[in-house]
Structure formats: structure tokens, C-alpha cells
Image (cartoon, rainbow, N blue to C red):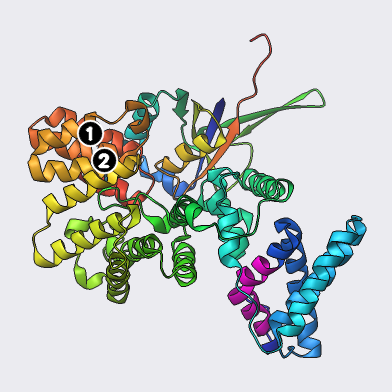
Amino acid sequence: MDTREDPSPAVLAAEAAARSSYGRLLAYLAARWRDVAAAEDALAEALARALARWPVEGVPRMPEAWLLTTARRLLISAARRRQVALRGEATVRLIDEELNAMERSAIPDERLKLLFVCAHPAIDPAVHAPLMLQTVLGLDAARIASAFLVSPATMGQRLVRAKARIKASGIGFAVPTTEELAPRLDSVLDAIYAAFGSGWDGIAADDPRTRGLAAEALWLGRVLVGLLPEEPEARGLLALMLHAHARREARRDGDGRFVPLAEQDPDTWDWPLVREAEDELRRAAGFGRLGRYQMEAAIQSAHVQGLLSGSVPWPAIAGLYAALTALTPAIGARVSHAVAVGETDGAAAGLARLDTIDGERVSTYQPYWVARAALLGRTGDQAGARAALERAIGLTEDPAVRAFLLARLS
Amino acid sequence: MQYMMMIFEPASEFAKRENTSIAPEYWGAWSAYSQALAEAGVMVGGNGLQPPPTATTLRLRNGAREVQDGPFADTKEQLGGYYVIDVPDLDSALAWAARCPSAAVSAIEVRPVLAMQNA
């Protein structure tokens, strides 16, 4: 039985302020304080105080400004304790002036700077996505750890180390200049895609639902497009994630069995998301600067059009993958390219493509073995196909996909 | 680095071993998993275990022998088998644990093997 009382309006207000503006508040504090960990601690304490005091004293007129003022006071007292008062006081005055001026305007949105800090080249790329999820969305380390299949203690340490590095190396809270923007933006995009659960490419059948952060990554993708509306690759990434997310329910039938893309019923797709994806992709194309994520989204779009028309445009898809593999060494793109070549030029040509991929990289990569089994089967090598399929089954994490592949084996 | 993956299964998983109607899928999944471990070059060893009622537990207490039928602890999930794998780090070990056929219903405890001196 749930013994909690109904949350009061004040508690709901505090929770709503936390949910909708956590990233904004943290970005604002971190950008001025240059210490992500200290800003996080102060904001967490401010939120705890809001939960304790708002139900008694009433919800302040400007909840976000209240949270910022409280967090700022906590940062000052912490700074005094650590005897870094000089720099602290200066920052505090700055925040004070801004908070006074804020009466009429909104809190400045510094989340873009925070995203660039999280994906800075001085930070281990493996921590980019976890850092974003924690600072911009306020997710806790344990949940992030589960999504990335890392021990919670290890994830906690990695996050702490990354924040210490941001502070110690004085990574600037700034949006990169025009010349620097493209490579730095790539890191931001890659991190958001990593949070989404990469590897969903039609044959991979790697279900991002199991990672549980697809919705959060989509949210980050939308924030990024809102902050950088002129960047076609940000829109390309959003379109790619929307396409994959639109088909999440279609990947299971009524009995929970896995349904591959080619057998999905388009009626089960989330059409508003598909339309939004197509719209983003169109707008991205308008800038005339093609990139990795626009290509991947275009491939998803081609699959959708193909399923609707009853004829998948494999030569076009193979062409897109050829261009994509020239841009990125990602193993998923190379495997998918081989599949598309197999559909266009025959199974032997597809297999020849697969054989060019380094054996070390494929030894635990499930989609490679799924693709290999299918291509070998078409060349008539049933024994080879069976061995590859067994290998794929042994590497599968999703129980529904495992059952699907096992049924193919027998 | 060597890790042991201990697979703690609920009774429903042990029951699947006796269910002939699902035998091809059940054993097929375990055999494919073991083979994938071997082919990726990480397998050190491992075994499935007979069900918990076949266990016998012994303790020496104050000089007296205590022998008890059944496993050492009466928990909902019981040890059903184990693998020892040799992988670069815990992240890789967890990736293998996630692929374990019963991971969706069992608990897979992953622990580093204690390196023995002079062994």
C-alpha cells in the first residue's frame, strides 16, 4: 500500500521546477562558478530546501530565481569554508546583479555552453554522454551506469574525475568559435547519440528501450536544435533518433515477439514522430551541408518510404552507406553497407564487403553475425550460415531477438 | 583479468530444463552463448549445476560436523551455473553478463577472481 499522502501543490511546484529547469539552473551556476560538482551540490541542497520550505511558506513568485539565490548562498558559504572567498565573492556579486535584473526576464540559457564543456576534447569521450545526462538532465549516476552497462561505483568515479578535470584544467564555459564549432559539435552529437543507444539500423535489432535513455536523448536532441537552429547535423541527429523512436512499439507484436523492420506494420509506427523526423531532415537539407547524421536519417527515411511503397530502394541506401563509411569508421555503418550491397549486387558482393572488416572488431558485434548468416544462407552455404547464426544468438542481449533468431535456426 | 559470472536463477528457470517442449530453444541459447564466449577467446571455464535440492551443505561448528540437505541459503534465486571469463575489464565482463540467456529473469553476479600467489 502506498502510504504517502498526496503531494501538496508546493511539493509539485518544487518538483516541476526541478524537472523543467534543472539543466538551465545548473548550467547557469556552473558557467559562473566554473565548478560543476560544487554547482550540483548547491542546486541539490537548494531543491531539498524548497521541498521542505515551500509547503510551509508557500511557493515563491519566481521559483527558479529562489532556487538560484539559495544555491548561490550555499556556494558562497562553501567557498568561504574552502577559503577561496576572493574569487567567490566576485562571482556572487555578478550573480546578484543578474538576479536583480532577472525580475522581468528569464534566466539566461547556458545549456549550450554546458553541452560543449561535457563533450570537450580534454574529457574522456566515454564520459561525454554520462556527463551530459547528469548535468543537463539531472539523472543520477546509478541510472546512467545501468544504461551504459557499467558498475554504479565506476560510473560515479568517472563522473567525479571528469568534473575535477573540468575544474582543474579550467575548461572554458563558452560556445566554440566558428572554426572550432564543427569538430566540437560532432562530439556533442556523438554523445547524445550514445545516450540514445546507437546501433539501431534495421538489421542490428539492438533495442534502445533496454537502455532506457532514448527519451532523454531525444529531449537533449530537441534542446540542441533549439539552441543551434542553423546546424543541419543537429537536425539530422534529431531526425535519426525520431525515426528509430517512432518504430519502438512496432518492434514487438502483441505477444512480445520481435518483429524485424521488413515485417513491421506501418500502422504501428508513431506517425507524428515520423513526420517530425521527415520535417527535420528536410530543413537540414535546406542548409546544403551534408553530414553523418543527415545521411543516417536519410537511410531511415528511405527504409520508411520503401516499406510504404512495397519496394525498398536498396541501390540508394547502398550509396548512402558508401558515403557514410567514407566519413565514419563506425562498425555499424560498415556492416549495414555490406547488407545493402548484398541486396543490390548479390550475396557474394555483400560477403566480400563484410570480409573487409577487421576480425578483432567483429568478434563480439552481434549485427555482423546476423548479416553474415543471412548472406551465407543466400549463397547456399547452409553450414556456414548456421554457425554464424549461432554466434549471433550467443551475442544477443535482447531476449525477444534471441528467440527470433533461435526460431530461424530450427 | 578473470571474472566469475555466477548465475542465480529463480525456480522457473530450473524448471525449463525439464520442459521438453522448449528444449531446442532453451539448450540452443545456452550452447550458442557458451560457444560465443569460446569463439571470442574469453572462456576460461564454466558449468551448469544440478538443481538446488541436490545440494548438501556442510559446516564444522565447535568441532562438530553439521551436514544439511539443500543449499546454504534458502533464497528465491539459486546458483544455477557459472562461467569464468578472461576479459580486459569489468565493463567487458558486464557486457558478457548482459548477453547471458537467463539475464532477463536471473541475477548475474560478476566478481573478479582472486589471483593466487605462487599458484
Q: What residue type is labelled 2?
A: Val
Q: Disc 2 designates what residue?
A: A335
Q: Quadrant of the N terminus of chain B?
A: top right
Q: Which of marks 1 and 2 is nearer the N terminus?
A: 2
Magenta segment's dominant SS is helix
The residue positioned 64% from the left and 45% from the top of the image is: A158
The residue positioned 69% from the left and 13% from the top of the image is: B117
Q: Visible in this render: residue B83?
A: yes
Residue B55 in the image: x percent, y percent? 55, 32
Residue A365 in the image: x percent, y percent? 35, 37
Segment tinted magenta in the rendering: A11-28
Front-most of residues A231 and A11? A231
The subunit letter for the residue under badge 2 reads A
Quarter occupied by residue B36: top left
Q: Visible in this render: residue B70?
A: no
* Same chain check for tags 1 and 2: yes
Determine which of the numbered discs, if any, sits on residue B42 in the image: none
Q: Disc 1 designates what residue?
A: A354
Determine whether the residue tagged by mark 1 lies in a helix, strand or loop: helix
Whole-angstrom CA distance, mark 1 to mark 2, is 6 Å
Quarter occupied by residue A386: top left
Front-most of residues A90 and A157? A90
